[in-house]
Amino acid sequence: MGESVAEATIIKWLKKEGDKIAADETVLEIATDKVDSEIPSTTEGTLIKRLYNEGDVVQVGKAIAIISTDANATIETPEVKTPVSIQITTVQKELANTAVKEVVSLEKSSSGKFFSPLVRNIAKQEGIAMAELESISGTGANGRVTKNDILSYIPTKGKHTSTATKVVQEVSSNGANHSKPAISVNAGDEIIEMDRMRKLIADHMVMSVQTSPHVTSFVEADVTNIVKWREKVKSSFEKREGEKLTFTPIFIEALVKAIKDFPMINVSLDGTKIIKRKNINIGMAAALPSGNLIVPVIKNADMLNLVGITKQVNDLANRARNGKLSPDDIQGGTYTISNVGSFGNLMGTPIINQPQVAIMAVGAIKKKPAVIETPEGDLIGIRHFMFLSHSYDHRVVDGSLGGQFVRRVADYLEQWDINREF
């Protein structure tokens, strides 16, 4: 799963106990953070035992199934000659032993819906009957009710929303009280349940705003030389490297240079301890066809030249669009860039991707009249400009550092050598 992934949730078993399995054949599907993955068998054989159920959360390194390589093995085989463990992950540490605990009794679902042992246990403890449990909208695979679904439902259990607006007190994870008006639903309104990824994004964004006091600094950069250089070399670049050259790798290269100049941007904050990161891992926010957001990470970006960064950017972007990212592809970022210019936006105020302390948004490149200084005097000319927006955590990054950093990125972009070789 990658060294930075600790746990995952089983969302669907594709093989039953007793089924024959070929080597590398998909046995089950799992979910980690925002990525769903298929887990293949490490060997050919017979699935003797599934050790966890759908909806269970498993720690990395735990065996989740036993496969016998004995050609004559059956599900009743008492002794496995060569057991092979498939290893995966779950969603909270306290759930690791769920599969071996006795599930409390709860009446059978009349609709035939599947509820994991964990969900049934929570329902029993909270006094939620099966009929009420079946009414909960699920965000799991095939609409299954997950742990987060039932925990989100519990605070509103038994309550009815009035059409009149009222103030509801909410307690966040950090213990602070927040007030918000209840939302009335009118005739003709459509209620759309968030999918799993959108819920994760929502929780992460709210957590980030509650955690970090955000400040945003803006700089306008003249990127005329970059625009002209890219136009000049993009055809030969694609012909030689087999890759399209976009602006994003150029922006990332400038970011990496500036991070080397200002390493205290490349940190995380743990209470009163500042963790200064050794590696420079650049996350690139990417919009998925579904409209959701995901942030694949270019690991050790400071070790790559422009061609290497371009290949990484294109590979991660393509796999993000096609749902082929692995869990490790979105882990370990130390700084994030968001290209809001791809939507035609001039600038944005991005939210920090925790546990990082800063994020940069790059806006659309636009032609503008500008004063050009020459030895013969000032002239008016047409230049290409873009805005850089740098949001940072004011607990650890002051305005001086935050402002100097974004200015340094702009300097690297403006000083681009139009005769540069690639």
Image (tube, rainbow, N blue to C red):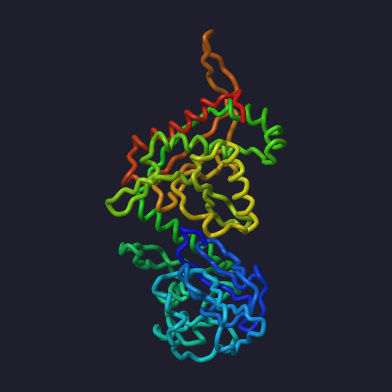
Q: Is residue 62 toward the left or the right of residue 274 in the image? A: right
The furthest residue to the top: 376
User: Looking at the rendering, in which quadrant would you find the C terminus?
Assistant: top right
Residue 100 in the image: x percent, y percent?
A: 44, 83
- Picture residue at 59% right of the left edge, 82% below the top: 48
- Picture residue at 58% right of the left edge, 34% below the top: 365
- Picture residue at 30% right of the left edge, 64% below the top: 175
The furthest residue to the front: 81
Q: Quick one: 197 or 263, which is closer to the camera?
A: 263
**313 versus 17 height, above or below:** above
**75 versus 162 height, above or below:** below
The quadrant holding residue 342 is top right
Q: Quick one: 373 or 29, which is closer to the camera?
A: 29
The furthest residue to the left: 272
The quadrant holding residue 247 is top right
Residue 231 in the image: x percent, y percent?
A: 67, 30
Tag count: 0
Q: Quick one: 417 or 183, which is closer to the camera?
A: 417
Residue 305 in the image: x percent, y percent?
A: 55, 36
**343 versus 145 height, above or below:** above
Q: Is residue 386 toward the left or the right of residue 92 in the image? A: right
Q: Quick one: 50 or 400, which is closer to the camera?
A: 50
- Picture residue at 43% right of the left edge, 45% below the top: 279
Residue 252 in the image: x percent, y percent?
A: 52, 39
**420 versus 214 height, above or below:** above
